[in-house]
Amino acid sequence: MFLALPIVEDEQDEQKNCSMMRNFPFDQKKEMCVPVHKSVKERYKEMTTQTGWTNTASFEEQIDIAARPGKIFALLDDARNIPQIIPELNNIQPSGNDVYMATYTVKVLGLVPLNFSLTYNVAGDHYPEQVSLYFHGNVEGTLRWMLTSLGTATHVVARADYKFSRQVIDDVLQSIPAGDNSILGNIFQRGTDMVGAGSSQIDLVLESLLTKSRDDVKQALKNLKMRCESF
């Protein structure tokens, strides 16, 4: 969760902010009691990077599939099938105990790749009603598949609850110097201009990342439907 603190205008206000944070660890309090001379933009950047994670993406997508729940459950309950359903997972390597190492690649703004290294595993929670896909590493959380029988068909709900490492995002942003005229720098500049002068590169990346991850889940459902209905 991003932390929103009052803007420090004078020493008295700064003392108030520090007293509000008395329950935080000492090192975190030092970072959050920002000096008076820092700009609002600098303070905002510090506050949004302190947790080390993006906000949790929590959403649902759904689809109807002309296949019985047991067939869909069997496909989802095999971790080897997941990259065919979510092709953004690449560089798959078995890690033992049905756990796999992978990279989740998201192209923010359609061009800039963010590569999140992770491990994943699946668990058939309730046959044939629910399968969970667990992520650990630079992506933390769950994609849960809930299956409801519609006779010879199945209603599938994909419930996502996961977050992304800010370190991966910050490394990309820090690689772009101020006033950079490269293709990458120009992409960010045009995007920032489109969403408004009050927005920053981090706003742009986070919005694009969460939108693209949701689109990936929508596409995963379509891929699941195509696989289950084709054999």
Image (cartoon, helix red, strand yellow):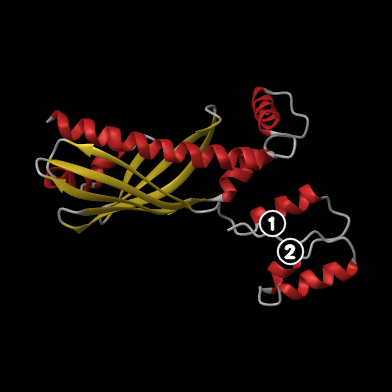
Say the numbered circle drawn on residue 194: none
**Image quadrant occupied by the N terminus:** bottom right
Q: Residue, x 15% and y 53% (percent of image)?
A: 128
Would you call the spot at circle 2 few (<14 residues within 10 Å), some (14-19), or many (20 or more)? many
- Seen from this angle, which residue lies furthest left? 152
Q: Residue, x 57% and y 40% (percent of image)?
A: 207
Q: How many marks?
A: 2
Does 226 sit above or below residue 46? above
The kind of residue tagged 1 is Met
Q: Position of residue 7 (x, y in %)?
A: 80, 59
The answer for how far apart the CA atoms under marks 1 and 2 are is: 7 Å
- Is residue 19 shown to the viewer in this render? yes
SS label for mark 2: helix
Q: Residue, x 21% and y 47% (percent of image)?
A: 78
Q: Position of residue 66 (x, y in %)?
A: 15, 35
| Marks 1 and 2 close (CB-CB < 8 Å) | yes
Task: Say left or right for 17 vs 124.
Answer: right
Q: Position of residue 147 (x, y in %)?
A: 21, 49
**Image quadrant occupied by the C terminus:** top left
- Determine which residue is flagged by label 2: 32
- Determine which residue is flagged by label 1: 47
Q: Residue, x 84% and y 53% (percent of image)?
A: 38
Along the viewing direction, whichever of 153 and 109 lies nearer the viewer: 153
The kind of residue tagged 2 is Met
Q: Position of residue 54 (x, y in %)?
A: 55, 51
